Amino acid sequence: MFNASVTTIVIFGIPECLLLILAIYTFGRKEVNKKDYILSSLFYLLIIIFTRSMPVLFGAHIIINIAFLILISVKLIKLPVNKAISCGLIIFALRAFTELINILMLIKIFNVDMEKTFNNEIIKNLYGLPSLLMYGCIILLANRIIKRQKY
């Protein structure tokens, strides 16, 4: 089981859910519907909180979250199933890539002891913010490029 504390939800969960759903709209080439966007983000946040509290092995919660994200993409955002699956896999791969870059920078450049970092929840969340910022920049850049291609 993983903890889903209020600190983690506020610092990391809410912005990450908003970005993941925006990424679905971006890569699914759908115009953002504000009501569905907020509803999808909140629903996905609740799913993440629920799956993190489940007694599953590390990594299994990610597969469950991808499945629910695909379901949200099909039911709420109205993407075709094949596009929802490809978008879900792309955005999770991008998220993993930005987290990898962030961890490598923390270890190699800033010599951060990751073992000590993971024991302090606030520090862990703050150290994770650069990867979320990188992810957000990639999504916003992709959104801008895709919108230009439409015209």
Image (spheres, helix red, strand yellow):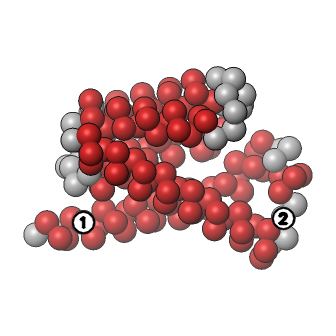
User: Residue at left 69%, top 33%?
Assistant: 57
**How far apart, in angstroms, are the residues tagged by discs 1 and 2?**
37 Å
Label 2 near label 1: C-beta < 8 Å? Answer: no
User: Residue at left 70%, top 48%?
Assistant: 125
Residue type marked 1: Ile
Q: Front-most of 72 and 151?
A: 72
Residue type marked 2: Val
User: Residue at left 13%, top 66%?
Assistant: 150
Mark 1 secondary-structure assignment: helix
The residue beneath circle 1 is 146
* Image quadrant containing the N terminus: top right
Mark 2 secondary-structure assignment: loop
Q: Position of residue 34 (x, y in %)?
A: 26, 39
Indicate the quadrant where residue 146 lies: bottom left
| Residue 145 visible in the current orientation | yes
Indicate the quadrant where residue 91 lies: bottom left
Circle 1 residues within 10 Å: few <14, some 14–19, many ≥20: some
Q: Position of residue 76 (x, y in %)?
A: 27, 31
Mark 1 or 2, nearer chain start: 2
Q: In the rendering, which numbered label is found on residue 112?
A: 2
Residue 22 left/right relative to 52: left
Indicate the quadrant where residue 54 lies: top right
Q: In the rendering, which numbered label is found on residue 77?
A: none
* View extreme (left): residue: 151
* Image quadrant containing the C terminus: bottom left
User: Residue at left 43%, top 35%?
Assistant: 67
Residue 61 left/right relative to 58: left
